[in-house]
Amino acid sequence: MDATGFKALKVIDVDTHVLEPADLWTSRMSANKWGDLIPHVKWDAAINEEQWFVGSKPIYRVGIPAMAGFDEYAPLHPVRMADIPADQTDPVLRLKKMDDYGVHAAILYPNVGVFAAADYLGMAVDPQFAVDCTRAYNDFLAEYCSTDSERYIPVMTLPFWDLDETTKEMDRAAALGHKGIVMTSQPDNFGLPSLDDKHWDPVWAKAQDMGIPINFHIGSGKILNYGLPENGEHSGYAWTSTMIFQGNVRTIAGLIFSGVCDRFPRLNFVSVESGIGWFPSLIETMDWQFLNSGVRRDHRDWLLPSEYVSRQIYGCFWFEQASAKAAIEICGPDNFMYETDYPHPTSMSPGPASAAQKPLDFMVDALGDLPDETIYKLCRGNAARVYNL
């Protein structure tokens, strides 16, 4: 398939990030009620750049996720919001960038709400504060996506520490147009039961009834930083970025071996920004251990792990070529989807300090020789089915 063919497909990019504007929470939450606790941006003289703050606590540097086309290698990044190109922040200009990239529609994930969630939502204050924060974010994202509701696809965050508020917000956000749930893979990092605990069954049951997927984005729990300072900041960043993929390996195995997939057979789970080249190895390993450990002595009716994966687990890829093709050949194309990770440091965003191709060029070079039906599933069909588009 050539570039014209990919454009005609109306490619759905299943993992991109919206850059939260500085007034997202301050313009939507009560200053009389929460004061300076409301997430806000200010200059941090200690590090000479702008940061997000909750109260007096710095939680996230504003420029970290805004790396598309940047002229320095990560972890270096823009130091002010004013330094971020407008096509990463303005929803109208971003559509033009998507046209240039050969992407028709994009699912939008947060930055602060994923990578700084432990600080942003885990503050030791009135639990209502975190409820108000998540509502404000979901409202913002719905408003942002209203710029073009066919091309921008919102997925909700949840006040997951409170199951009653969580189920309320699921209904409220879905009514605003949200098509999925962003869920942490490590709720135990927030002092909550681990993901395999039946504590979460009400969330899984409601999502299954609503027909919306659960999305596990990498870095949604505690991020461990790797590398000694003497080895250089770039090496440490690359090592850390490589290792956070492995968190989703643990998540998928946990969903299967804890019986979540068995109890909720119509619920789809998506492993986001973690690649797919490792899927065949994980599946083969889980089946081997399942059979060799006698799991059916405890669970006579359980399927093989590979059957659960085939039925309801999905993975997303962007830079992989040989490993992605191998996974598609071994596992089939029905459980994989294409993403760009725009505008993150490792996204498919060409620039002076990036090895990336333009997404359209990558799709032609890496996927163009696959059967048209396979390309359709990877670049549009699977996403349209999973997210009910």
Image (cartoon, rainbow, N blue to C red):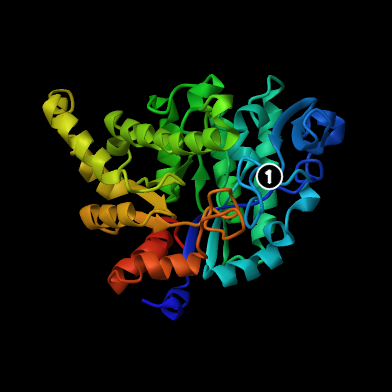
Which quarter of the image is occupied by the N terminus? bottom left
The extreme right residue here reads 32
The extreme bottom residue here reads 4
Vertical order, 84 against 256 (above or below):
below
Q: Position of residue 19 (x, y in %)?
A: 67, 50
- Amino acid found under the numbered disc labelled 1: His
In this rendering, would 385 be left or right of 229?
A: left
Q: Position of residue 42 (x, y in %)?
A: 83, 37
The extreme front residue here reads 230
Give the residue drawn at x 18%, y 29%. Answer: 289
Give the residue drawn at x 64%, y 47%. Answer: 138
Front in this rendered view, residue 283 or 203: 283
For label 1, the SS is loop
In this rendering, would 245 be left or right of 63?
A: left
Q: Position of residue 85 (x, y in %)?
A: 73, 58
Give the residue drawn at x 45%, y 49%. Answer: 210
Q: Position of residue 320 (x, y in %)?
A: 39, 53
Give the residue drawn at x 69%, y 28%. Answer: 128
Front in this rendered view, residue 41 or 208: 41
Camera sees residue 294: yes
Vertical order, 369 against 192 (above or below):
below
- Displayed quadrant of residue 328: bottom left
In this rendering, would 237 be left or right of 263?
A: right
Front in this rendered view, residue 333 or 347: 347
Task: State the residue position of label 1.
Answer: 77
